[in-house]
Image (spheres, rainbow, N blue to C red):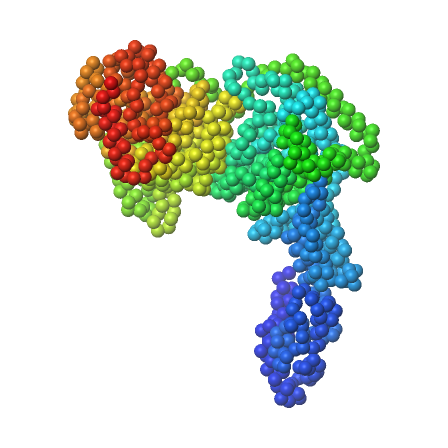
C-alpha cells in the first residue's frame, strides 16, 4: 500500500495538471507563441488546439445556465490571455478522450454532495408524526438530484461513490433508495453536528448501506407484538377497572415498552450489568409492570388505596406513579439489574439524581478518584425517559448535559428517550419551545439524535439498539426522540379537545400502534388474526388473576436497608443524644496535621500558600488556635485513614470561596497538582474534591444521588454562598427533606451553606436558614449553625460515626474563618470529646475572663443565639462590662435539643430569656424556635414563660447594602439583647 501511494504521489507531481507546474507551462506556451517549432512536437500539437478566442468548455450547454448555481457572468466567453487561468484549472486542458473521466469525477462530487445533504437535512423530510399534523418543509429541492446537476438521462449511469453508502458504484435510484430509507422514512437522524469524525463515520457505517435497514426475524416481530399487546392491554385493563382514576397512561406511546426491552437486551450483551432509570409519571406504571417486572397485583393493590410498604414501617407514602422499584432481568444468559428511582412531579429533576447514583455505583466498581477504563464505568448505564415539553423547557436538562463530560461527574454516557407527545399539557410545541425539536437542547454536547415514528415499533426498537451500541462504544450520551401522541388528556379525567380540537379529532380516528402493527404482520404472513386474539385473551386472563390476587396482597418487606445500606438502622427519634464516637486521639490528629502541611520535594508552592502552611504547622505543633479550615481538614483526614471516602463538590471548593481551604496545591512553575489529604497514610480512603460547573440544581441533585448509593462515604456539597442554594430549592424540598418519609430512601448528604451578616448587602448575607427550618419535621433532617472549629469537626465526623444517616444542612461561616475568637484547641477534638448541641458561655471556661459572670442566681438575663452573632454579643458585653447576662449557643437547631436546654435553663429560673439573631425577624430561627422555648420554659417552671426577640426588624430584603445602616442595626440588636428593659 505504501509503495503504491508513493507511485501515485510521483504521478501527481509529474502530471501537467499539477498546480506546481503552472509557471513552467506558461513559459512553455510563451515560447510556442514566439516560435511554434521551438517546443516539443507533442506540446506544439497540444497548443494548436487551444484558441484564446474560443470557449472549448460550454459548461452551460449540457446542464443548463444555472448549473450548481454558477452565475451566468462566470460562463461567458473567455477573455484574452485566458490560458493562464485555464492552465491553473485542470479541467479546461483535458483532451476530448479525457472528458469521460472529468464527467465521472464531477458525478462523484455531485453524488457525495447530495449524500451529505441527506445526512444533514434528511430528518426534516422524514415521516415522523404518526398523526401527520406536524408541519414539514414544502421545498424538497435540497434533496433532489436535479439540484446537484443530474438529469433523468443520468439516472441509469453507475457513479463511483467509493463505498460511501456501502456501494463502490451506484446509480442515482440506488442511492436515493438507501438515502430515503435511512434518513427520510420513519427514522430521521441528526449527527452531522458532531465534531468527532470517528463518531460520525461510525454512525454512517452503522445505518447506511443496502443491508443496513430495519430487519427482524419473524420471532423478533412476534416479540415486539407481544410487548405491544401487554402495554396496550395493561392500560385498557386499568381504564376499565379504575375508570377516571389518574394513571398518566402510556396510551399512544406503547412502542416505548419493546424499545426498553431492546435496550436492556442489547445492553446486557454489550456488558451492561445495571441500568438506573429515571422517568416522569407518563407511562410509569406500564414501565414498572412490563419492564421492571413489578407484580401487577402490587400495582392493583395501590390503585385500591393500599400502601406500598408494610404497616410497621413509618412514612407518609406517595402516589403510585411516583414510586420506584428494582428487579433483575435476564436476556440470553445476561443478567441486568434494573432500578427505577422514585421521583416527584417536578419534571426532569430526577435526572441529575440518577446520574449521581450511577456515578457512585461506578465508583464501587472502579475505585473513587481513579482514572478507570470507561468500559468499566459503562457497565452501569443511566437511562432517562423524558417528556417533550419538559426536555426543552426545564433548565436542569441543560445543566445535566453540562455535567456529563466533567471531572467527577462523568458516567460513560447516558441514554435518553423522549416520549414526544407533541404537546405539553395544553400547550402546542410552537408555543413551548423555540427550536424545531425538543431534543435540540442536547446538541450542546454533540449527542447523536435519532428521531423515530412511534407508530413504527420496528423502527423504534431498531434505533434503540443503535443508541445502546453507540453509548457502549463511545461512552457519550445518546438521544432517542420518539414521535407519538397522548391518546387521552394530561390525565384520564382531562378533556384535551378544549384546547387541541384538531389533534384530538385526528387521534379519535387514528388506529392504535398495536392495531397498525398487527395488520402489518398479518399482511406479511408472520401471524394470523386468531393468533393475535389468542395473545390478547391470554394477557387479559393473566391480569384478571393478578387483580383477584391484589385483594389479599399485603406488603411484607421494605427494601430500604439492603445492599450497601446493610448494617445501618432506622434512627430512633427518642434517642436524644445520638452523639456518635467522634473524638480522635491527639497523637493521631497531629500525625494527620503534619502530613497536611507537607509538599513534595522540588514542589514550588505559592509564597502566600507557604505562609498558610507554616501557620497551620504552628497550630498543629502547639495544639492551640486551630481555625475552621484546619479543623475541617483534620476531620477529613481522620475519616480517610479510618477508611471513609470523602467527596466534596461545589463551585471553587478546592481553594474555597474565601481562600480558606487550599485542598489542592499547585506548583507555580508546572501547575502540577498535589492533594495533601490523599497522602496522609498508605491504604487510606480517597478524598475527592471537585470544582463543579457553575450550577446549583444539577450539581446538588447529582451529589444527593451519589449519597443514595454511598452511605459509607461522606458526601458534601458546598454552595459558593449560602443564598445560591435557592437555585436548587426543588432538591431540598422534594428529595433531601422528604424522601425518607415518602419513599423510604435515606441520605447522609452534607450541605455547607456560607451564612453571616457582615454588611455586604442583600446578596450572600443569608443562606435563608428559615427555609430549612420550615422543612423540619418527623426527624427528617439536621440543621446546625456551629460557632467553633471543634464542633464543626465533630458534626462532620458524626455523619459517618453513627449507624444511621440523615441529611445535614450546615450554616458555615465567612468572617469567622479568621476570627480571633473562633478557634479551638486540639484537645477539643480528642478521644473523649464529641459534638455539643448547646455550647455554654466561654466566660465560664476561660481562666482569666475579662468579665467574670455572676453566679446562677445573679444572672439577670439569658441570651440564646446561634452562629456568628454570639461573638458580636460577647465582645459588646465585654465592652460594656456586663456581668449578669449569660450567653447560650444553640449549635443544632433541629432536631431541637429540648431536653438539653431544659437542663441548662434550669440553672436560671428567674432570668429573662431572649433570643438574639442577626437575621430580620421574619427570617432566621426566631419563628421556628419560639414555640420550643415556650415549651422549655413551661416545663422548668421559669419565672418568665416567653422568650423575647432581639434582632433586626422584619424586612423584605435579607440585609441592607449600606454599611452605616448595617452597623446601626447591629448596635440596636445588641442593645436590645444585653441592656434593653423587657418589662
Count of residue discs = 0
Q: Measuring 61% from the left and 74% from the top, which residue is drawn there?
A: 88
Quarter-of-image position of residue 753: top left
- In the rendered structure, the answer to whether residue 830 lies left or right of residue 166 reads left
Q: Measuring 57% from the left and 37% from the top, which residue is drawn there?
A: 390
Q: Measuring 56% from the left and 44% from the top, which residue is drawn there?
A: 441
- In the rendered structure, the answer to whether residue 374 lies left or right of residue 663 reads right
Quarter-of-image position of residue 973: top left
The x and y percentages for residue 959 are 33, 35
Say which quadrant the N terminus sits in.
bottom right
Q: Measuring 33% from the left and 17% from the top, which residue is drawn there?
A: 933
Q: Residue furthest front?
A: 498
The x and y percentages for residue 166 are 71, 53
Q: Mark yes or no: residue 616 visible.
A: no
Say which quadrant the C terminus sits in.
top left
The x and y percentages for residue 369 are 45, 38
Q: Is residue 699 or residue 513 the one in the foreground?
A: 513
- In the rendered structure, the answer to whether residue 636 lies left or right of residue 228 reads left
Would you place residue 86 above or below residue 463 in this image?
below
Q: Mark yes or no: residue 876 visible.
A: yes
The x and y percentages for residue 737 are 46, 26
Amino acid at each position: 500500500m505504501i509503495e503504491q501511494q508513493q507511485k501515485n504521489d510521483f504521478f501527481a507531481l509529474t502530471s501537467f495538471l499539477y498546480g506546481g507546474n503552472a509557471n513552467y507551462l506558461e513559459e512553455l506556451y510563451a515560447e510556442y507563441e514566439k516560435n511554434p517549432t521551438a517546443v516539443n512536437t507533442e506540446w506544439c500539437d497540444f497548443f494548436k488546439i487551444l484558441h484564446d478566442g474560443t470557449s472549448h468548455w460550454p459548461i452551460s450547454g449540457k446542464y443548463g445556465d444555472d448549473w450548481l448555481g454558477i452565475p451566468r457572468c462566470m460562463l461567458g466567453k473567455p477573455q484574452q490571455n485566458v490560458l493562464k487561468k485555464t492552465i491553473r484549472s485542470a479541467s479546461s486542458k483535458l483532451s476530448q478522450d479525457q472528458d469521460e473521466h472529468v464527467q465521472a469525477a464531477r458525478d462523484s462530487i455531485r453524488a457525495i454532495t447530495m449524500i451529505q445533504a441527506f445526512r444533514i437535512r434528511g430528518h426534516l423530510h422524514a415521516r415522523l408524526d404518526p398523526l401527520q399534523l406536524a408541519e414539514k418543509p414544502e421545498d424538497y429541492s435540497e434533496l433532489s438530484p436535479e439540484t446537484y446537476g443530474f438529469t433523468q438521462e443520468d439516472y441509469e449511469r453507475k457513479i463511483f461513490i467509493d463505498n460511501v453508502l456501502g456501494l463502490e458504484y451506484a446509480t442515482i435510484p440506488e442511492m436515493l433508495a438507501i438515502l430515503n430509507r435511512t434518513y427520510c422514512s420513519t427514522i430521521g437522524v441528526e449527527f452531522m453536528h458532531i465534531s468527532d469524525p470517528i463518531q460520525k463515520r461510525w454512525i454512517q457505517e452503522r445505518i447506511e448501506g443496502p443491508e443496513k435497514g430495519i430487519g427482524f426475524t419473524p420471532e423478533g416481530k412476534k416479540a415486539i407484538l407481544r410487548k405491544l399487546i401487554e402495554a396496550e392491554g395493561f392500560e385498557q385493563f386499568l381504564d376499565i377497572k379504575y375508570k377516571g382514576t389518574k394513571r398518566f397512561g402510556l396510551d399512544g406511546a406503547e412502542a416505548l415498552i419493546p424499545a426498553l426491552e431492546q435496550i436492556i437486551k442489547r445492553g446486557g450483551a454489550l456488558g451492561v450489568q445495571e441500568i438506573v432509570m429515571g422517568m416522569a409519571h407518563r407511562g410509569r406504571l406500564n414501565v414498572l409492570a412490563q419492564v421492571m417486572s413489578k407484580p401487577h397485583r402490587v400495582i392493583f393493590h395501590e390503585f385500591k388505596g393500599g400502601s406500598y410498604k408494610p404497616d410497621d414501617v413509618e412514612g407518609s407514602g406517595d402516589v403510585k406513579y411516583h414510586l420506584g422499584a428494582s428487579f433483575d432481568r435476564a436476556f440470553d444468559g445476561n443478567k441486568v439489574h434494573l432500578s427505577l428511582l422514585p421521583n416527584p412531579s417536578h419534571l426532569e429533576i430526577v435526572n441529575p439524581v440518577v446520574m449521581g447514583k450511577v456515578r457512585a455505583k461506578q465508583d464501587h466498581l472502579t475505585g473513587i478518584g481513579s482514572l478507570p477504563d470507561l468500559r468499566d464505568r459503562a457497565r452501569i448505564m443511566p437511562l432517562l425517559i423524558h417528556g417533550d415539553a419538559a426536555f426543552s423547557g426545564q433548565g436542569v436538562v441543560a445543566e445535566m448535559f453540562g455535567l456529563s463530560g466533567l471531572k467527577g461527574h462523568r458516567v460513560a454516557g447516558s441514554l435518553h428517550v423522549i416520549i414526544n407527545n407533541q404537546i405539553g399539557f395544553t400547550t402546542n410545541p410552537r408555543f413551548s419551545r423555540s427550536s424545531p425539536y425538543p431534543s435540540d437542547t442536547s446538541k450542546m454536547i454533540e449527542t447523536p439524535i435519532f428521531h423515530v415514528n412511534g407508530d413504527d415499533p420496528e423502527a423504534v426498537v431498531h434505533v434503540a439498539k443503535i443508541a445502546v451500541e453507540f453509548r457502549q462504544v463511545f461512552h457519550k450520551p445518546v438521544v432517542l426522540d420518539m414521535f407519538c401522541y397522548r391518546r387521552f388528556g394530561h390525565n384520564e379525567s382531562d378533556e384535551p379537545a378544549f384546547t387541541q380540537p384538531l389533534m384530538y379529532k385526528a387521534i379519535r380516528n387514528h388506529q392504535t400502534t398495536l392495531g397498525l402493527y398487527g395488520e402489518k404482520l398479518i399482511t406479511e404472513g408472520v401471524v394470523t388474526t386468531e393468533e393475535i386474539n389468542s395473545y390478547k385473551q391470554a394477557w387479559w386472563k393473566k391480569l384478571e388473576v393478578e387483580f383477584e390476587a391484589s385483594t389479599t396482597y399485603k406488603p411484607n418487606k421494605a427494601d430500604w436497608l439492603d445492599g450497601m445500606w446493610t448494617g445501618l438502622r432506622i434512627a430512633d427519634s427518642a434517642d436524644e443524644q445520638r452523639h456518635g464516637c467522634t473524638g480522635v486521639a491527639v497523637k493521631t490528629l497531629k500525625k494527620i496535621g503534619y502530613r497536611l502541611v507537607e509538599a513534595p520535594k522540588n514542589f514550588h508552592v505559592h509564597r502566600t500558600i507557604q505562609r498558610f502552611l507554616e501557620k497551620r504547622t504552628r497550630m498543629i505543633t502547639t495544639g492551640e488556635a486551630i481555625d475552621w479550615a484546619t479543623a475541617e481538614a483534620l476531620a477529613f483526614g481522620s475519616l480517610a485513614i479510618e477508611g471513609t471516602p470523602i467527596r466534596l463538590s461545589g463551585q471553587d471548593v478546592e481553594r474555597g470561596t474565601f481562600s480558606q481551604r487550599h485542598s489542592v496545591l499547585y506548583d507555580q512553575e508546572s501547575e502540577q497538582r498535589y492533594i495533601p489529604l490523599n497522602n496522609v497514610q498508605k491504604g487510606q480512603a480517597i478524598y475527592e474534591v471537585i470544582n463543579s460547573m457553575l450550577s446549583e440544581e444539577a450539581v446538588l441533585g447529582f451529589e444527593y444521588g451519589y449519597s443514595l448509593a454511598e452511605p459509607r462515604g461522606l458526601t458534601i456539597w458546598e454552595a459558593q454562598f449560602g443564598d445560591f442554594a435557592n437555585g436548587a430549592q426543588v432538591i431540598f424540598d422534594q428529595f433531601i427533606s422528604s424522601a425518607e418519609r415518602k419513599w423510604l430512601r435515606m441520605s447522609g448528604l452534607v450541605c455547607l451553606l456560607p451564612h453571616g451578616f457582615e454588611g455586604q448587602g442583600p446578596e450572600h448575607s443569608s443562606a435563608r436558614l428559615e427555609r430549612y427550618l420550615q422543612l423540619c419535621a418527623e426527624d427528617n433532617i439536621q440543621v446546625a449553625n456551629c460557632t467553633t472549629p471543634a464542633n464543626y469537626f465533630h458534626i462532620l465526623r458524626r455523619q459517618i460515626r453513627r449507624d444511621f444517616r440523615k441529611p445535614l444542612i450546615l450554616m458555615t461561616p465567612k468572617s469567622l474563618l479568621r476570627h480571633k475568637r473562633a478557634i479551638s484547641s486540639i484537645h477539643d477534638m480528642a478521644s473523649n470529646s464529641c459534638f455539643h448541641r448547646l455550647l455554654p458561655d466561654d466566660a465560664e471556661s476561660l481562666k482569666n475572663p475579662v468579665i467574670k459572670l455572676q453566679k446562677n442566681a445573679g444572672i439577670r438575663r439569658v441570651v440564646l443565639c446561634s452562629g456568628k452573632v454570639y461573638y458580636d454579643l460577647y465582645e459588646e458585653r465585654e465592652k460594656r462590662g456586663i456581668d449578669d447576662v449569660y450567653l447560650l449557643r444553640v449549635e443544632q437547631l433541629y432536631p431541637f435539643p429540648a431536653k438539653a436546654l431544659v437542663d441548662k435553663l434550669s440553672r436560671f429560673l428567674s432570668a429573662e430569656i431572649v433570643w438574639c439573631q442577626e437575621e430580620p425577624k421574619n427570617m432566621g430561627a426566631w419563628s421556628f424556635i419560639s414555640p420550643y422555648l415556650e415549651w422549655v420554659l413551661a416545663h422548668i417552671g421559669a419565672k418568665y414563660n416567653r422568650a423575647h426577640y432581639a434582632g433586626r426588624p422584619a424586612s423584605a430584603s435579607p440585609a441592607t447594602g449600606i454599611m452605616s445602616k448595617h452597623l446601626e442595626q447591629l448596635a440596636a440588636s445588641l442593645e436590645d439583647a444585653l441592656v434593653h428593659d423587657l418589662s
